[in-house]
Amino acid sequence: MDIIQLFILSVLEGFTEFLPISSTAHLILASQLFQLGESDFLKSFMIAIQFGAILAVVFLYARRLLKDWEMGKKILVAFLPTAVIGFLLYKIIRGVLFESPLVIIIALFVGGIILIIFELLFKEKETHIADMKDITYAQAFAVGCAQSLAIIPGVSRAAATIMGGMFVGIKRVAIVEFSFVLAVPTMAAAAGYDFFKNAGGFTASQFHLLAAGFIISFFAALLGVKFLLNLIQRYSFVGFGVYRIVVAVIFFIFLIYK
């Protein structure tokens, strides 16, 4: 991996992590374009640079969360379904799903269609929750169950949580912010467990790559969060659905003629 590839992958991770387009899919498909192979280090790198995105959310929301311990408990409730499923299916996720570009492409394509249909049919109501502090424990758990679908690379954790939250009566701004903070334990657990399993095999130079990726991802994530918060004030998620479909088609063609 050269410095240009590292920069591109890190920016992709940070900027797309909180958008409903699957950062994992972008990273895996980009690594296919770069012909980086499927080494254990690359898989761990793609998870490790998520720490940069995590730190960006902590930086933006730490003060608010420290003042609201009730919200912290709701986040943990929402995190539980993914924690259990992710732990039980870790070997399948790492050994099978992450190594199948076709699975990722299908998930991107189908997810794009679902996102478009959902936005066209969904009608936000005045009675829906407008602030994430008012989200109930039942709604938090439902969002967590939706998030667990994102163990399939290409589904998008952000898309699953946002659509799940809107479906159970949470307004888009509130669920987008809840999705941001829910990412902290979810991504930290995934990256931490992966490091525990694989860090012993890294060289000193590889740790330098991880550190550089972490920093780049942090700043890219700050931009991604601000971009999404500004965008949802004026537009729906239909554009993201169209984008997912286009990317899926492009990479399907690439996969055929590779």
Image (cartoon, rainbow, N blue to C red):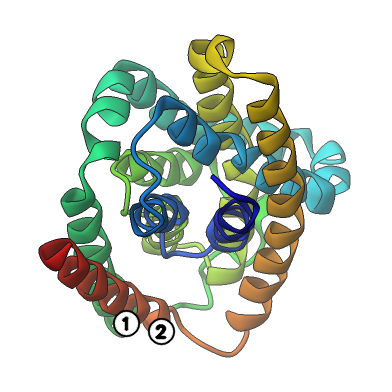
Residue 11: name its quadrant. Answer: bottom right
- Label 2 belongs to which residue? 239
Relative to the observer, which residue lies in front, 29 or 83? 29
Question: Quadrant where the C terminus lies?
Answer: bottom left
Q: Is there any visible trace of residue 122 in the rendered image?
A: no
Residue 196: name its quadrant. Answer: top right
The residue under the point 61% across, 30% down is: 188
Q: Is there any visible trace of residue 203 in the rendered image?
A: yes
Q: Residue furthest left?
A: 256
Pinpoint residue 237: horizontal percent, then vertical percent: 43, 78
Name the kind of residue labelled 2 in the image. Answer: Gly
**In the image: residue 147, left or right of residue 16:** left
Question: Considering only vertical position in the picture, is 129 above or below 237?
Answer: above
* Numbered marks: total: 2
Distance from the alpha carbon under mark 1 to that under mark 2: 5 Å
Disc marking residue 106: none
Q: Dot 2: what SS?
A: helix
Relative to the observer, which residue lies in front, 50 or 236? 50
The residue under the point 45% across, 40% down is: 138
Q: Dot 1: what SS?
A: helix
- Label 1 belongs to which residue? 242
Q: Residue furthest front?
A: 2
Pinpoint residue 26: horizontal percent, then vertical percent: 42, 58
